[in-house]
Image: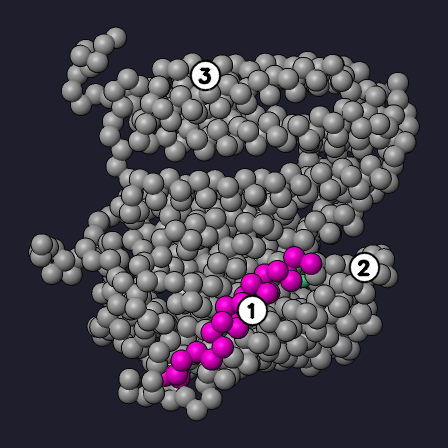
Amino acid sequence: MSHASVPAGKYNADNPAPHHFGHHFESAEHEFSSAKQGMWLFMVTEVLMIGAIFVGYLLFRLRFPEAFHEAHKELNVKLGALNTVILIISSATMVLGVTAAQRGNNRRSIGMLITTIFLGGCFCLVKYFEYTHKFHEGIFPGGLYHFEGLTVPHAPLFFSFYFVMTGIHAFHVVVGMCLITWIITRIKRGQISKEFFTPVELVGFYWHFVDLVWIFLFPLLYLLG
Amino acid sequence: MAHTAEAHGDNYLNHEKGLWSWMTTVDHKRIGLMYLASVCFFFFLGGIFALIIRLNLMHSGHPVVDANTYNKLMTYHGAIMVFLVIIPAIPASIGNFVLPMMLGAKDVAFPKLNLASYYIYLAGATFACLALFLGGADTGWTFYTPYSIRTGGGVILVIFGAFVAGFSSILTGLNFIVTIQKLRAPGLTWNRLPLLLWALYATSIIQVLATPVLAITLVLLIFEHVFKVGIFDPALGGDPVLFQHFFWFYSHPAVYIMILPAMGVISEIIPVFSRKPIFGYRAIALASFGIALVAFIVWGHHLFVSGQSELANFVFSLLTMFVAIPTGVKVFSWVGTMYKGSIRFNAPMLYALGFIELFTIGGLTGVFLATLAIDVHLTDTYFVIAHFHYVMVGGTIMGFVGGMHYWFPKVTGKLYNETVAMWAFISIIIGFNLTFFPQFIAGTEGMPRRYWSQLPEFDLWNTLSTVGSWFLLLGFLMVAWNMIKSAKSGPAAGDNPWRALTLEWQSKSPPPHDNFGPTTPTVTHWPYEYKGANV
Ligand SMILES: [Cu+2]
């Protein structure tokens, strides 16, 4: 589709609209730096939120070391490692998508963002298989646990943390996939350009953060003996 | 260009018309007013619950509600007052209105997010209130485990409501930090920043850092119900004391989310009505941050009798006493500002003086409670109730109502009735002390908190307290009546009736839609250059 075929006044990925910054800002740069600061603050709240569960996990790990050691053997390290690789690649495609948007290459950006969503989907699929396998064996959090193969006292608590931590993380992955879908539609509507790519960059921040959390979760849950 | 509409009094109230224009507004001033209306509604609701509680305790052996209802009333009174009234009261209503104007900005940094915070707040409130129809909650506002895991009814919905309302608080704090960082008018350096904004900045930091911990704690508590995770459930190997640690890691700093903005309001009112520069500007500004910092390392004083280690008790006790230092700095600076000033006793100043009196009592009794040996005796008695009501009602609500009077002319363009305001204040201050001072005495004599029925030996104190609560009701009704009537038919206020120097008073009353019209205000001086009665 050539630029000439675009009717005047209709914007799309190839022909984005000019950006008008908010009336309370001095410039587009002022708006952008404010939005970035807001996003960093939001990331801080996420760190504290997830940090609290990490603290809880570490406390119980110190309290019941044998139970946590035995229980962690039930996790599938290979699938965990596969998911780690998937998320690292998705972070790379995200970077490529954001850079493309910054340079005004919206077509390429959409391609990279779709790849990122796809990888996020793969992550969730692997997680789905891990979860259903556990449920099948009777491995549930805390009071619902009825797995015959591992009867060490307090082992169910390990799985409480496992499900809560990976579950909250997976929830963030799904939210991230929705946000990427949202920015793709904005690019397609011509709302993202070389002059205005704030939403793309901020969703990128978010996605990297979610990946980073997994980088901590994987060794903590799957590897630490 | 002389805009004709502006010449004919175009302002934020009549800029757009109709209910829909309010519901979809991104104007920080309108959002502030919507918060104000909601906060006042919930204050009224929580207040009614409190009045029933007081009525129930008036005479031993003459209950007016049954024990289960009492437990629910006490839970709802606490949860509503904390999460829906005192935490958003000053930042989200007065702060929303005043903060961008004090900065000389047209709006907060993220106006749509600001509106979203309001609806998130309403959603949280709705969940909590819906629970009333599902059997309510009877855990107390602290939701301590394991009881909160065992009890049924609507407790999950109340917890979820508090969780949702927390996000509103986080987003408001985030918005304010970026606004103060990024949207200061030309010339508004950090050394010229009004003290209310220093206080709101410190408050916002606590909101952003502490609230997420409460959020995740409440999520885990919901998971206890739904998935039986057992992390806080001793029957499953979990640790109920960990819940208390997490809960107070938020809820102690939350006390400063409540009190710091009130201190900011008082710091604005006192120099204006003393016609003197604020004493110790930098000390007050830094003290806000000092309090915010110490806020995060004292939570353990809520666990002195929860089986915490002796060492932890000692450290938390010591650290808690440090809170008194920045707080004392503020109180002495306010008194120093008033010293030899030309004091005018308008309603805002009366509330500021009320704040100093009540907050000082509340703060000092906090030091008593921080003292280990005394706390063991006073834990879970009415002494604690009296202490935190002196801080939260005597502090925050005094600051809130004082601020409402102070900015009333700016918000509405009208003057409130000074005589009615004075009598309302007198009724409130008498009612407050009558309600809560007897509770200190009853508490030292061992009267336990949260009990549905009390022993006859406390009857005198309980009766006094209940009678006091009626004076409080009368006072607040007078305030409401005065505000509503004056907003409708009060005399015109003029742009700056108090001759105050902060930026919001340089705008029109009520301000235009974009706060200052086409010109951006430029700041050339410190906002506290008051020089005596006539200047
Ligand atoms: Cu505390």
CA–CA distance in space, label 2 to label 1? 25 Å
Q: Give the image quarter of residue B496.
A: bottom left
The disc labelled 1 sits on which kind of residue? Ala
> Label 2 lies in what chain?
B
Picture quadrant of ligand 1: bottom right
Provide the residue designation for mark 3.
A112
Q: Which of the labelled discs sits on residue B287, or is there none?
A: 1
Q: Give the image quarter of residue A210.
A: top right
Q: Is residue A123 magenta?
A: no
Please say if the residues under marks 3 and 1 sit with CB atoms less than 8 Å apart. no
Label 2 Cα crowd, 10 Å radius (few <14 / some 14-19 / many 20+): some
Residue A225 appears in the figure: yes
Give the mark toward the camera: 2 or 1. Answer: 1
Q: Is residue B238 left or right of residue B350?
A: right
Identify which residue is drawn at 45% across, 16% down: A112
Image quadrant holding the N terminus of chain B, namely bottom left
The disc labelled 3 sits on which kind of residue? Met
Q: Does the magenta stretch include residue B290?
A: yes
Image quadrant holding the C terminus of chain B, namely bottom left
Label 1 Cα crowd, 10 Å radius (few <14 / some 14-19 / many 20+): many
Q: Position of residue B25 (x, y in %)?
A: 31, 46
Identify which residue is drawn at 78% across, 39% down: A58
Span colored in magenta: B274-297
CB at disc 2 and ligand 1 closer than 8 Å:
no
